[in-house]
Image: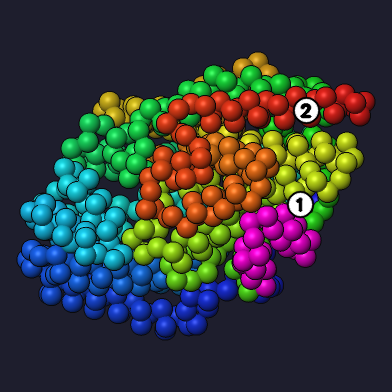
Amino acid sequence: MAEKLVKRSEVPVELTWDRSLIYKTDDDMRKDRDKAKALADKILNDYKGKLNNADTINACLNDFMELIRLITLVSNYNSLGVSVDYTDGKLQQEDNAANMVISEAMSKISFIPVEISSQDPKVIDEAINKATGAKNYLKDLLREKPHMLSAEVERVLAAFGPVMGASYTGYETTKMADIQFPDFEVDGKTYPLGYSLFEDHYEYVTDTKVRRAAFDAFSKKIAEYQNTTATYYQTNILKDKINSSLRGYKDVFEYLLFNQKVTREMYDRQMDTIMAKLAPHMRKYAKLLQRIHKLDKMTFADLKLAVDPTYTPSVDLKGAKEYCMKGLSILGDDYVDMVREAFDNRWIDFAQNIGKSTGGFCASPYGKNSFILLSYHGEMSDVFTLAHELGHAGHFRACNNAQSIFDTEVSTYFVEAPSTMNELIMANYLKTTSGDKRFKRWVLSSQIQNTYFHNFVTHFMEAYYQREVYKIIDAGGSVQADTLSEIFRNSLEKFWGDAVEINDGAELTWMRQPHYYMGLYSYTYSAGLTVATAVARRIEKEGAPAVEDWKNVLRAGSTLDPVGLAALAKVDITTDKPLNDAIDYIGGIIDEIIALTDELGE
């Protein structure tokens, strides 16, 4: 039975990450916070009105890079603290104080892009030729110039930074601090409930009564906050719409895709192709789960069930470390050393506690190690999550070491490729460890359940729903909780057809992810995994040459756009072939799972 969540103060220190790897003390952080404030004043005094020659431009940008470095460290140190305990008022106070300083600093230096872009193109070209770490930053300024506002307007908008992010802060605070889940009962037994307990545990429980009761209890509780959450979300997307209009984009989609450096066609392709071509495969998979688990009906609450739950091994942290080191060893000794360091030096927050963010993420402040958040439950799915987040860590370790801080802002279209690639590498490794049919089926089903379901279904459904919401806002409409729930239910029903009953509460899934506050992010999971699938299959066939190409991709950072990064790995994402191949690959895995199930007589 799941254990009741404890307070953060009660968590063993070895299960927590070590923020002192950024700053030894809060006072050290505050010193850098003050340095950032002073440097912003210096940049304003030294360079405003003077960015009219290549040497001055580059001197200014060198100071700007140092300011970004300081801001990155201060911001990560504070946000990491809050993310593991939203109930801690002191941590939130420090985070708010840091955000105010950062906002003021960014407001003061907001003149830089406007002033540089207004110079004669010959001056900018000379600056590009002389630049060391700012070449691509200057090239991007030329690209962004048509959408820049006046220096004063940019300054004011930058000053509103904390307010611009208030919707996300409010959402996370409501979700992690305000919602207190009651226990629920099944056949006289009492079970504790919480966000991570539900999403990381109860959704996978094989006892149908407990699983469905947990889903009902969870859904009823979050429903009490649907209007508040909808208000936060509408405020966020209105912000995007207003920004797109102010900056002269033709619509909100062009605005949100601009920094991703991808086309609307590439964006729409993910939604339309997956809905049309993957849905039939996943319906077949849902029917298989219903058959294996002898369910009276297949509901949305049953979709996270494992094909063979009795075979899924429990994995302690020592075992997880060993799996990750061996499974990812194909990426080289230095990569394995990074994995070892991540476990040994407390880069990872494994704890389950009240107020901690759900899901998982990896933060990689420039010049420091990465920080990985997840809630570890001792299940094999956690190993895939670790491999995923270590993929982000390996990516930014490579590009942060190879590139200037300006060249580490990798397009979100591509950023999930290294992480999902690691999940595939892990699965390929596990396939080689045994010839047992049941074990092989478990590995294949883990690929579907942990990798492709999460990225090609869960996040895809978010993205498909999100596109419909933005269409309404772009047309001048508004959305409330009822509208959001209706859109999400319609999206689920379209994907699952008559294979799955979309039971009450499923429509509230729009409340559960923070990705909606990050622009058009949800769709990039399937986009990244499309690239990862192509490269992983290439590594299986070619070995070392394909691995070396991939390492070059990781080192490239944001010096190339997504099309260029994929091409470096010999994948052409200007066509629909990689996506269609990935969907065919998923369908093939599902067919193989069904065949093995038949052979095993289940």
Q: What distance separates the C-alpha of mark 2 from that of mark 1? A: 24 Å
Residue 309, given in percent of the width and then of the height, sits at 82, 40
Q: Which residue is depicted at the point 82% across and 53% down?
A: 314
Q: How is the image coloured?
A: rainbow
Q: Which residue is depicted at the point 60% across and 49% down?
A: 545
Q: Is residue 551 above or below residue 248?
A: below
Mark 1 crowdedness (10 Å alpha carbons): few <14, some 14-19, many ≥20: some
* Nearest to the observer: residue 356 or residue 179: 356
Mark 2 crowdedness (10 Å alpha carbons): few <14, some 14-19, many ≥20: some
Give the quadrant of the C terminus: top right
Q: Which residue is depicted at the point 60% across and 58% down?
A: 390
The answer to whether residue 92 is visible is no
Dot 2 and dot 1 residues touching (CB under 8 Å) = no
Toward the right, the furthest residue is 601
Q: Is residue 132 above or below residue 497?
A: below
What is the span of residues highlighted in magenta in the rendered image? 316-344
* Nearest to the observer: residue 544 or residue 176: 544
Question: Which residue was labeled with disc 1?
Answer: 379
Residue 345, given in percent of the width and then of the height, sits at 63, 74
Q: Is residue 116 above or below residue 449?
A: below
* Nearest to the observer: residue 508 or residue 414: 414
The kind of residue on which mark 1 rests is Glu
The kind of residue on which mark 2 rests is Glu
Left or right of residue 84, residue 444 in this image: right
Left or right of residue 113, residue 418 in this image: right
Left or right of residue 385, residue 530 in this image: left
The label number, if any, that marks residue 592 in the structure image:
2
Residue 417, given in percent of the width and then of the height, sits at 53, 45
Q: Which residue is depicted at the point 64% across and 39% down?
A: 537
Q: Which of the two labelled residues, at mark 2 and mark 1, occupies the earlier sequence position?
A: 1
